[in-house]
Image (tube, helix red, strand yellow):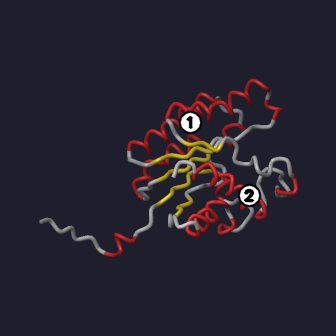
């Protein structure tokens, strides 16, 4: 008979969700505890899913930046789930969508190789970037979700996009009041696969 010596602390350790994002997840312009990843942790616990959410989002980050720091992050925070919310800054800078897609694919593959499940969050770019670019940009997320069989929230800001009062003065970053709506949109898609 083999008896495993597992401490109570280990047995009770919560599962982890690692959020890799930019200012839209970092909570730019609002308090850190108001950002949607923190609200997600509280909501999951209330629903009997005691996940610890590590918000490793950095304002201004691109898909290349996320790619460069992800390996160290996933080693430091072994996560059952990785939520990737990157690409908006690539789009705003007009960077090639093929490069963004390669960077996100690398992050997804790295996460999956370490045994993490992945939830991808897409973005949309304003129409002034041209129809071809905006279409290719949003299609990148759909393609990645299909190719890597990961769950997807197609557009992070969908719950608030039509209401400009939900955005700060820069008209780019959501207000604190918008965060619960954003969180519920992500949660809805995430729970389908949990």
Residue under the point 79% across and 31% down: 129
Q: Which mark is residue 3?
A: none
Q: Residue at x 43, y 43 (%)?
A: 112
What whole-number distance in Å separates the C-alpha atoms at marks 2 and 1? 23 Å
For label 2, the residue is 181
Q: Dot 2: what SS?
A: helix
**Quadrant placement of the N terminus:** bottom left
- Label 2 vs 1, first from the N-terminus: 1
Q: Is residue 118 left or right of residue 175?
A: left
Please report contact status of discs 2 and 1: CB closer than 8 Å, yes or no: no
Dividing the picture into quadrants, the one containing residue 113 is: top left
Q: Nearer the viewer, residue 111 or 185?
A: 185
Instruction: Tell me what residue is drawn at x 77 percent, y 56 percent.
Output: 174
> Looking at the picture, how far across and down is residue 65, in whole percent?
56, 45
Is residue 97 left or right of 159 when viewed as pictured?
left
Q: Toward the viewer: 102 or 36?
A: 36
The percent position of residue 124, horizontal first and vertical second, equals: 73, 39
- On residue 145, the disc is 1
Secondary structure state at the residue bearing disc 1: helix
Figure check: 128 above or below 13:
above
């Amino acid at each position: 008979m083999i008896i495993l010596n597992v401490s109570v602390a280990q047995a009770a350790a919560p599962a982890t969700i690692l959020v890799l994002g930019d200012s839209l997840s970092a909570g730019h312009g609002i308090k850190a505890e108001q950002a949607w990843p923190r609200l997600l942790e509280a909501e999951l616990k209330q629903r009997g899913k005691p996940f610890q959410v590590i918000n490793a989002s950095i304002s201004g980050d691109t898909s290349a930046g996320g790619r460069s720091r992800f390996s160290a992050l996933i080693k430091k925070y072994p996560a059952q789930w990785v939520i990737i919310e990157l690409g908006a800054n690539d789009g705003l800078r007009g960077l090639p969508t093929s490069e963004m897609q390669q960077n996100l694919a690398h992050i997804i593959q790295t996460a999956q190789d370490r045994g993490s499940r992945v939830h991808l969050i897409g973005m949309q770019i304003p129409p002034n970037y041209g129809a071809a670019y905006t279409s290719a940009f949003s299609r990148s997320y759909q393609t990645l979700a299909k190719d890597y069989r990961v769950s997807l929230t197609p557009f992070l800001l969908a719950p608030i996009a039509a209401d400009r009062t939900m955005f700060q003065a820069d008209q780019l970053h959501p207000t604190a009041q918008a965060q619960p709506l954003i969180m519920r949109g992500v949660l809805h898609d995430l729970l389908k696969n949990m």
